[in-house]
Amino acid sequence: MPARPPAPLSPPPSVSPAVPASGPSRRAFLAAAGAAAAASLRPPALRAGVATEPPYAAEATLRIAAARPINAFDPDQALGSTMDELSPQSAAKIYTPAIIQASLSAGWGPISYRNHTELAIEAWHWNPEGAWSDAASDPANPRGYFTGNAPPSAHPIHRSYGYPLPRRGTTRDGGASRGYSRITDGDSTTFWKSNPYLTQRYTHQPDSRHPQWVILDLGAELPVNAVRIDWCEPRATRFEVQYWTGGDPMSWEAQYSPGGAGVAGQANGRWNAFLRGRNADGAPGSVLLRLIAEPLPVRWLRILMTESSSLACPGANPNGDPRDRCGYAIRQLYAGLLDADGTFLDYVTHTPDQNQSVTYASSTDSWHRASDLETRRVQTGMDLFFTSGITNHLPAMIPVAVLYGTPDNAAAQVAYLRARGYSVGHIEMGEECDGQYCMPEDYAALYMQAAQAIHQAWPGLPLGGPVFQGINQDITVWPDAQGRSSWFNRFLDYLRAHHRLQDLAFVSFEHYPFDPCNITWADLFREPELTRSCLQSFRTDGLPAGVPLMITESNLSWNMTEYMSEIFSGLWLADSVGSFFQYGGSAYYHSPIQPQPPNRGCHGWATWSNFVCDRNFKITGYTAEYYASRLINLEWVKHGAGRHRMFATNGTVTDAAGHRLLTTYAVRQPGSEWALMIVNKDPDNAHAVRAVFELPSGRVAAFRGPVRMATFGKQQYVWHGDGPHAHADPDLPPVVRSLPGGHAAVYRLPPASITVLRGRIG
């Protein structure tokens, strides 16, 4: 059904100071912050313009190639927002009619549900009611693998939770800043265990096709000639101890460095076997291995495992769950110097916290216990999500757990949604697999298993991924045996080889383009090219032309920065959305939908949100991204109208360095109105444009009046991020006016501004 229209326009409320939340990370910030708008809140109106205009620095002719569209999209499917994890205190306040009405007033259409449990190495109980695989061993604390109940009950699901995995092998990754690895926790009773669904029993391939590994980071190059491995069962009976040469092998987020040098260095490095590092008859228990006669300077070590003992792990299900025997398990790992007299000097710090020597694991078993429940963060319950109105009465993007879940649990979740009759547009398979250091072949194998189970529960439901975290370019990993280092290319090849490419109905990724502490105004000029190269990399890697590309979570940066609330952010958002569709994107979700209080970040205080709220969660102001959102959703496109067509535009003004100061995005709305969204990235000067439409007949046309012109820029908005009371002043809405059209019409663009021109042509 059509999206609910935004709230009526009326004057903004008075602005009062706001107070901070703690913690700069986007995930932590989203969890800690909440919002509850006053019931009387209405978004600010567009202001009437003035008649006189100051001069402009330069003039450009915009030539719109109106003969052939370059893309087409329906805003009700293509322009949305997101809801992430929340704190328990804020969850109840967000899901109220007032806050939902305020959140939707930014104009975004559909919503994407974000799943933080996949980032935090947790099992997601999307339904608190369900069955444990081993409930009998300890009825007071059931354990094993959990499957939520698919049939709906009389108790609607309002909240759901994650369960940190007790067999974790990664100290920290793209989302896990709490918890620790069991490989270096100093506890001989705990252990890491790999994901059983990556073994032959479930992949139907030899285990050597999905080798599992653990990596140890010593923190600096140290002379190493020996390791000690305290195996648990199932142990590796065939494994190899390796060391790394090259740049940081775990720099999977280094695309944010200038030129992507970190990625290139990582992809060009290599793992090398120690001279005595190959083991074909792994013994049980604690094994001390002399790897080489003379010590080598080493920082990174890897245990690569390719064959398992297939013996049951401690605490195995007495009923004989085969998953207890699948994979590999390690209790503790040590590395250092072994003297001639047998004395072993261990460099590893063993402690059950984030101060331990850092380890990474290729996968983690999703086995857990009821007592592992994490209550400091909540995921919105499925029933509350779909009945609260936050979905805008449009099909929603819903995730299932893949990395730290089971196919049965994913299928049960989908079956539940289907039984409830909820409108689901797409299913995302896991979240941020690259941030969890999941190898492409492993993710593909898990993807295929989950897809098969889901399609049995709901045939034809569109599935997609891999939900990359904030990428600017192709993700590269350690080269495989064929020398291939492109993560996505290898993922596609795995699906093709197994005749399952049809299970990839769309490709999704997140977009957080800029380093929060190193943003400059010049980064605005980079955004269109970052978008183009990112989208093109997927096609270059072999993605078929008919598979849509979607940004399912986005903002200026992955951590807080004052630029997040400055006029910079509004210009960036308009440019990001426009360039995404210009270069062939299909759906863009901006994050987050709900208000947030200010928080300390690089350069000053800011907020992730479209709104600023105080300690009582009352909205006290609007941000540049809010006003930009309304220009995009209420002026540039028309929600509820249907499919819009986009056209290429030439013409700009450049500065002395060759930067394109003006970027223009042209759409034809259903009917006969055209809309041009023009971003003036010159912070100091106004510029002017003429608009010429090149028609299929070879003739040219222009706007024929009246032309609706809506403008928002630094003349309406200035952010003051100087502390807990950060706010915008002035904090004024866009200026709107009606202008005459014609071939001679010139439209002035104020400095640092977004302008939408809308009207008919002739």
Image: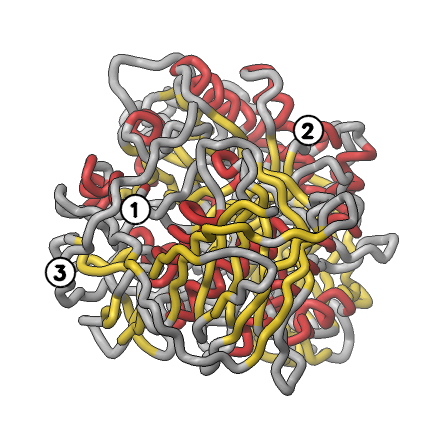
Q: Would residue 610 be found to the left or right of residue 660 on screen? A: left
| Distance between the alpha carbons at the discs numbered 1 and 2 | 31 Å
Nearer to the camera, 739 or 645: 739
Identify the secondary structure beneath mark 2.
Answer: helix
Q: Residues within 10 Å of mark 3 (few under 14, many from 20)?
A: few
Residue 244 in view in this figure: no
Question: Which amino acid lies under the numbered mark 2 shown in the image of this protein?
Answer: Asp
Q: Tag 2 or tag 1, which sits nearer the N-term?
A: 1
> Could you tell me how many numbered marks the image carries?
3
Q: Position of residue 106 (x, y in %)?
A: 34, 48
Of circles 2 and 3, the one toward us is 3
Q: Position of residue 665 (x, y in %)?
A: 58, 55
Of circles 1 and 3, the one toward us is 3
Q: Which residue is mark 2?
A: 503
Q: Tag 3 or tag 2, which sits nearer the N-term?
A: 3
Q: Is residue 457 above or below residue 207?
A: above
Q: Which residue is mark 3?
A: 14
Task: Kindly identify the residue that appears in the image at 87 percent across and 53 percent down.
Answer: 482
Task: Kindly identify the residue that appears in the image at 55 percent across and 74 percent down.
Answer: 523
**Quarter of the image where one finds residue 545:** top right
Q: Position of residue 426 (x, y in %)?
A: 54, 30
Q: Is residue 305 above or below residue 265?
A: above
| Distance between the alpha carbons at the discs numbered 2 and 3 | 51 Å
Q: Residues within 10 Å of mark 1 (few under 14, many from 20)?
A: many
Question: Which amino acid lies under the numbered mark 3 shown in the image of this protein?
Answer: Ser
